[in-house]
Image (cartoon, helix red, strand yellow):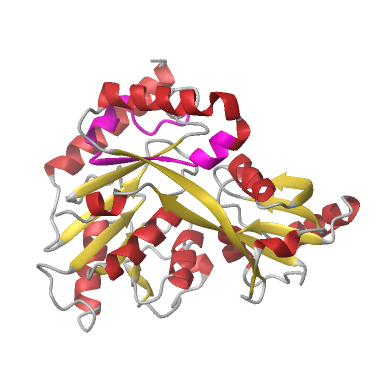
């Protein structure tokens, strides 16, 4: 461990110790979805489908999210389950996406997830009626949120780049040492579809090796494989187009997410003729000048369509979006038995 990593680790350890010492409980079940690396492992699509499945199984789910980059500190209601109540700048791109995609599932933003949960209980009394048995709080990006007790921790690990250079922040992507994998109750290896497409001969052995490494730190948690499959295109006005629509068209792509390479691979797997691509930093805040540059880049690439992620579309709201800009919608699909493990309380 380098001196820079040691400094980070000291701060991390003190924060964790203090949080666990003062940990609080909500009067209902809580599950957490998170990772041990910075960047994207597919948490938002996973949170969405888990919330949808919770509803099907008779739970009353409410999502508690930090709302990274959102200006409001919270706790605030992003949605009561019938659409966004805040702007993307106030809520953040991920809470806004969840608020738009999920019907009948409240989304509450708050850095302190315990306070956000109490706020939800007090402000959603008509929807939250049976605290003991039915209400389920889902912590989005909550693996390191030790302040709040949870019944289950779901850990996502990206198969295409599990742990980067295996260094702690700031020299690598690790939020925690790999030993933290031991805390997970359920582990999901994500983007196994991208791994197979990128390295077909090595994919199976690569995932097998990853599982063996995970087992060095956690022998009890069930491990599942998940894919992030392209499902459809979303127009700037909210309409839907099938994947087949892209055939014969040229596209220029861009994104400001934690794993742009994964998005590029998803575009190619959807049959997109990708003629150019630009990456921005994660959660990048676009302006009108950026849009003009993207349009010009698309023209230079001889692309008559521009494609981005659903998260990026959230951050483009309020700008003059060109009519030929669309988003690729990604669906999280996971191995059989996963949901039985998640909802087995």
- In the rendered image, residue 242, in percent from the top left (x then y), is placed at 65, 66
Q: Residue at x 33, y 27 (%)?
A: 214
Q: Residue furthest bottom?
A: 126
- Apparent side of residue 103 relative to residue 307 in the rendered image (left or right): left
- Apparent side of residue 300 relative to residue 74 in the rendered image (left or right): right
Task: Assess whether residue 212 is covered by the magenta stretch.
Answer: no
Evaluate whether residue 180 shows in this view: yes
The quarter of the picture where residue 25 lies is bottom left
Task: Assess whether residue 193 is covered by the magenta stretch.
Answer: yes
- In the rendered image, residue 240, in percent from the top left (x then y), is placed at 62, 72
Q: Residue at x 15, y 78 (%)?
A: 129
- In the rendered image, residue 275, in percent from the top left (x then y), is placed at 81, 47
The quarter of the picture where residue 17 lies is top left
Q: Nearer the viewer, residue 200 or 177?
A: 200
- In the rendered image, residue 53, in percent from the top left (x then y), is placed at 32, 63
The boundaries of the magenta stretch are 170-196
Residue 104, above or below 345: below
Q: Classify the position of the C terminus by image quarter.
A: bottom left
Q: Nearer the viewer, residue 70 or 202?
A: 202
Q: Classify the position of the N terminus by image quarter.
A: top left
Evaluate whether residue 109 shows in this view: no
Residue 244, above or below 151: below
- Apparent side of residue 51 relative to residue 268 in the rendered image (left or right): left
């Amino acid at each position: 461990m380098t001196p820079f990593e040691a400094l980070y680790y000291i701060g991390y350890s003190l924060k964790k110790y203090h949080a666990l010492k003062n940990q609080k409980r909500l009067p209902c079940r809580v599950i957490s979805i998170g990772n041990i690396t910075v960047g994207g492992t597919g948490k938002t699509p996973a949170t969405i489908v888990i919330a949808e499945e919770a509803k099907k199984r008779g739970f009353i789910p409410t999502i508690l999210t930090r709302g990274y980059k959102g200006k409001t500190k919270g706790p605030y209601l992003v949605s009561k389950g019938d659409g966004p109540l805040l702007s993307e700048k106030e809520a953040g791109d991920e809470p806004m996406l969840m608020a738009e995609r999920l019907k009948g599932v409240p989304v509450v933003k708050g850095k302190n997830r315990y306070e956000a949960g109490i706020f939800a209980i007090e402000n959603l009394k008509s929807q939250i009626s049976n605290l003991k048995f039915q209400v389920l709080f889902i912590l989005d990006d909550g693996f390191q949120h030790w302040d709040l007790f949870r019944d289950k921790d779901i850990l996502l690990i990206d198969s295409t780049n599990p742990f980067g250079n295996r260094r702690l922040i700031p020299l690598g992507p690790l939020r925690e040492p790999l030993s933290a994998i031991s805390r997970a109750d359920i582990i999901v290896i994500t983007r196994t579809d991208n791994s197979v497409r990128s390295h077909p001969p090595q994919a199976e052995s690569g995932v097998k090796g990853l599982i063996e490494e995970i087992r060095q730190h956690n022998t009890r948690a069930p491990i599942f494989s998940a894919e992030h499959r392209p499902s459809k295109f979303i127009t700037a006005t909210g309409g839907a187009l099938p994947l087949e629509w892209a055939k014969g068209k040229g596209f220029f792509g861009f994104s400001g997410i934690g794993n742009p390479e994964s998005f590029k691979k998803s575009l190619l797997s959807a049959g997109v003729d990708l003629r150019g691509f630009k990456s921005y930093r994660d959660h990048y805040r676009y302006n009108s000048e950026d849009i003009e540059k993207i349009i010009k880049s698309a023209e230079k690439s001889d692309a008559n369509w521009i494609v981005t992620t659903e998260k990026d579309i959230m951050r483009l709201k309020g700008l003059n979006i060109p009519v030929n800009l669309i988003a690729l919608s990604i669906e999280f699909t996971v191995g059989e038995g996963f949901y039985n493990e998640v909802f087995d309380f």
